[in-house]
């Protein structure tokens, strides 16, 4: 299997080559040159454990890691011990347990990993793949990133203690919740470096961008990233669409719908790929919060990314995205994999503009992909959290609430609806308090983590101060 760029002007590459990189040299995103067709394997896969299923699916996309090694990586990644925070501890061995709210209306628990958000599902695999490939090559990598919460902690928990990997994670000083700070800063691993920047998330992000643009520094200090455009993250996410399908159906003739709380279009892109491989998905339902760029596209055919200043700060913060970094992957398929068309469309996006597919043959093609969408507001989120609590005695987090709200608007008789649960309520206790007047219950092991000693260096939002820290520890 080779990987090609959505912009069509970079050479095709192997999996291990693209694993450690970000964008393709031509500015595009990598995708497999074709999607393996698996409709006739569903019956055999239905019985597999999560780790076995992951191995089967990953094997179709990874041909430069020996099968026995890839198997060992899957087995080590997807254990009941790592994904142990299920509502029902007895279900932890399912890795992604299904919880039913009503007949044919389910939550797929993706947030039972170490940081209680779905990003662990892919990031834990990435940690093990990075370590394996770097060991083989005798190389090292220094991951530099900026986070406002979920991504940074998932990266740190995935990379902690790994050979040949160091993580330098910038976060805005004093802007994250006490729980989020404790999650990250209490890690004492020698290869994890928390850097709190006096400023906002954007200041931290700008520093990361400035380092990435400094080619000499980047090469000398082997700076890498683990952002959401990484192909291996998307690939890892394909697995739980299959697992969720098997848990919600009895036979392989049935269709299901998935509802996905979306920001960067990474999670739902994996659903699109699962469907392209032959998984019987009737509809993919995309849910946004007040930042409704993607909802607007699927309703109208107009993609109009917003400026950062136009992005609302909401109570489902991991979906506060004004430009969906993985969306280009879907559009590449939508336009019949014509890279020249993608280049033309993103010429407009990259210069701050928008594109409008109405009246083109691509707009007609869009209907064939059977996406529907909707948006949710803070008031909707509170109402949904209250309703699910009152009706089912289940606490759901703010992002999942956006999903449940939109999923309810798109139910079809006889088609099970599976809402992806992307985080646990405990991460967003302020909004849970507002909705329910009580605090979410916390897993016992995480009680009092705010009191643990913290390891963090605080710096001004100045490039040189961050570079100094990297240099000192490399
Ligand atoms: C990252 C994240 C999302 C959005 O996922 P995308 O892949 O960016 O669409 C939704 N919910 C939570 C809790 C997240 O952390």
Image: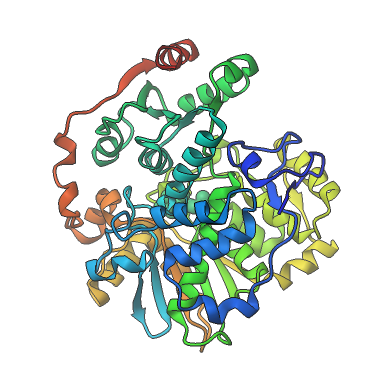
Which corner quadrant of the image does residue 235 belong to? bottom right
Which one is in front, 78 or 201? 78
* Nearer to me, 4 or 248: 4
Q: Residue at x 63, y 63 (%)?
A: 273
Where residue 360 appears, x then y in whole percent?
Answer: 84, 61
Residue 384 % position (x, y): 35, 67
Answer with left or right where residue 269 lies relative to residue 154: right
Placement of the N terminus among the 4 image quadrants: bottom right
Image position of 178 (left or right of 301): left
Name the residue rendered at 80%, 56% in the picture: 337
User: Where, quadrant-wise, is the C terminus in this rendering?
Assistant: top left
Q: Quadrant of residue 212?
A: top right
Q: Residue at image x 67%, y 48%?
A: 304
Q: Is residue 182 visible?
A: yes
Q: Is residue 86 left or right of residue 123?
A: left
Q: Is residue 206 above or below residue 404?
A: above
- Residue 453 higher or lower than 443, as above or below: above
Which of the pair 352/341 is nearer the observer?
A: 341
Identify which residue, 303 or 213, lies in the foreground.
213
Q: What's the image's color scheme? A: rainbow
Q: Position of residue 274 (x, y in %)?
A: 60, 66
The residue under the point 81% across, 60% down is 336
Q: Is residue 470 above or below residue 16?
A: above
């Amino acid at each position: 299997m080779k990987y090609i760029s959505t912009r069509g002007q970079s050479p095709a590459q192997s999996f291990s080559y693209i694993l450690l990189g970000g964008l393709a040299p031509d500015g595009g995103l990598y995708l497999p040159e074709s999607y393996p067709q698996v409709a006739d394997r569903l019956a055999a896969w239905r019985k597999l454990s999560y780790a076995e299923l992951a191995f089967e699916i990953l094997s179709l996309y990874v041909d430069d890691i020996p099968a026995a090694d890839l198997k060992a990586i899957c087995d080590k990644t997807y254990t009941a011990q790592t994904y142990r925070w299920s509502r029902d501890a007895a279900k932890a061995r399912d890795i992604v347990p299904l919880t039913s709210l009503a007949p044919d209306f389910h939550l797929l628990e993706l947030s039972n990993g170490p940081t209680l958000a779905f990003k662990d599902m892919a990031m834990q695999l990435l940690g093990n793949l990075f370590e394996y490939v770097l060991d083989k090559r005798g190389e090292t990598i220094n991951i530099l990133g900026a986070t406002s919460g979920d991504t940074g902690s998932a990266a740190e928990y995935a990379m902690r203690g790994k050979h040949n990997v160091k993580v330098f994670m910038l976060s805005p000083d004093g802007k994250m919740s006490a729980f989020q700070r404790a999650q990250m800063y209490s890690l004492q691993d020698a290869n994890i470096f928390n850097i709190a920047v006096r400023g906002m998330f954007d200041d931290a992000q700008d520093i990361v961008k400035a380092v990435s643009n400094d080619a000499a520094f980047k090469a000398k200090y082997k700076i890498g990233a683990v952002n959401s455009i990484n192909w291996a993250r998307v690939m890892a996410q394909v697995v739980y669409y299959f697992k969720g399908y098997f848990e919600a159906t009895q036979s392989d003739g049935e269709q299901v719908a998935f509802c996905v709380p979306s920001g960067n279009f990474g999670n739902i892109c994996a659903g699109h790929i699962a469907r392209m491989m032959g998984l019987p998905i009737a509809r993919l339902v995309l849910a946004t919060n007040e930042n409704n760029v993607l909802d607007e596209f699927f309703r109208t055919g107009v993609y109009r990314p917003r400026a950062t200043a136009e992005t609302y700060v909401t109570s489902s913060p991991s979906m506060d995205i004004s430009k969906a970094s993985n969306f280009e992957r879907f559009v590449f398929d939508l336009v019949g994999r014509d890279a020249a068309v993608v280049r033309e469309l993103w010429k407009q996006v990259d210069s701050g503009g928008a594109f409008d597919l109405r009246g083109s043959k691509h707009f007609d093609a869009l209907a064939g992909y059977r996406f529907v969408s909707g948006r949710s507001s803070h008031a909707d989120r509170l109402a949904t959290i209250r309703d699910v609590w009152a009706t089912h005695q289940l606490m759901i987090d703010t992002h999942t609430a956006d999903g449940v709200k939109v999923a309810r608007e798109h139910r079809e008789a006889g088609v099970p609806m599976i809402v992806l649960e992307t985080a646990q309520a405990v991460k967003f206790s302020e909004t849970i308090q507002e909705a329910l007047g009580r605090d979410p219950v916390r897993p016992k092991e995480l009680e009092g983590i705010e009191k643990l000693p913290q390891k963090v260096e605080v710096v001004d939002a100045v490039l040189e101060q961050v570079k100094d820290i990297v240099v000192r520890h490399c």
